[in-house]
Image (cartoon, rainbow, N blue to C red):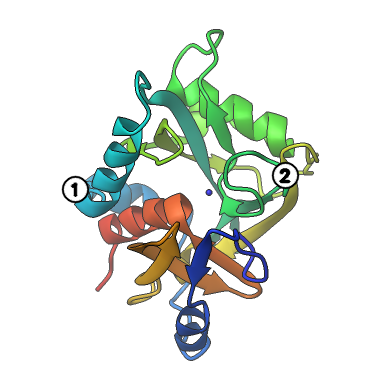
Amino acid sequence: MENAARMNSTITLNQSAILAPQTRQSPMRPLSRNWLVQRFSLSPSHNYDERVIQRATDAMKRQVGSELRPAAVMIALAERNGELHVLLTKRATHLKHHPGQISFPGGKVENSDQDIVETAIREMEEEIGVCTNRDDLLGCLASLPTVSGYLVTPVIAFVDPSYTPVIDSNEVDTLFEVPLAQFLRRKAIRKQPFLVRGNTYDIYAMSYQEHLIWGVTAQILHALSRQLSLN
């Protein structure tokens, strides 16, 4: 859930192949809240890439006695002038899992959480100080297993565009927004080979300005974009 300038030393990713095509594509028309509510409600959900799920499953098999831990991320959407924007964070560089990568606000389920939706709402408020409630909930995507041992459920909700962020520097380095339409462009999120500990895998990735969005975050956005696809 990495800035284009900083990649984990165990990973080699050809970012130039991702960065170049994105700058030549024209943006789509703005997407409003009303459009998304109708489109999301009427469109069938899109499953994740089976190879991504298999990689996570294989990683868990190598950890004897380990079970996937439930977690949630919040796909927070702010509407300005009729256009929805997705809130994304750059994770703090000292974190154990996915340091410096681009991600949604989120984290593991706590015993005090009523359900997975409460986990996503709580984590977003704790990490970036942005609040929402169940009245502004759009829905959830299918849960996705990760190689770090979590079963992540993406929750989608609208937030007040006039929010004032309060960033927890222990978790988050930067908060920024991307127009939702950017993720729905044709082939905006594409598979790219990368090397991890001597093995080559295909992952989803895309660039936006100076940010490289890849891994679990890109996989979730790809599933959402397929569900909402205009092409």
Q: Is residue 166 left or right of residue 37?
A: right
Q: Position of residue 85 (x, y in %)?
A: 56, 58
Residue 168 vs 174, above or below: the answer is above
Secondary-structure class at tag 1: loop
Q: Eyeballing the image, is 25 above or below 138?
A: below
Q: Which residue is mark 1?
A: 44
Residue at figure coordinates x 50%, y 88% from the top left: 20
| Crowd rating for badge 1 (residues with CA inside 10 Å; few <14, some 14–19, many 20+) | few
Compared with residue 64, is residue 79 higher up or lower down, i.e. above or below?
Answer: below
Q: Does residue 116 appear to the left or right of 47 in the view shown?
A: right
The image quarter containing residue 192 is bottom left
Residue at image coords 35%, 59%: 222
Q: Nearer the viewer, residue 97 or 33?
A: 97
Give the distance between the C-alpha atoms of the residues marked 2 and 1, in whole angstroms: 33 Å
Q: Position of residue 25 (x, y in %)?
A: 45, 87
Q: Position of residue 77 (x, y in %)?
A: 54, 49
The tag on residue 172 is 2
Q: Is residue 199 visible?
A: yes
Left or right of residue 6: residue 158: left
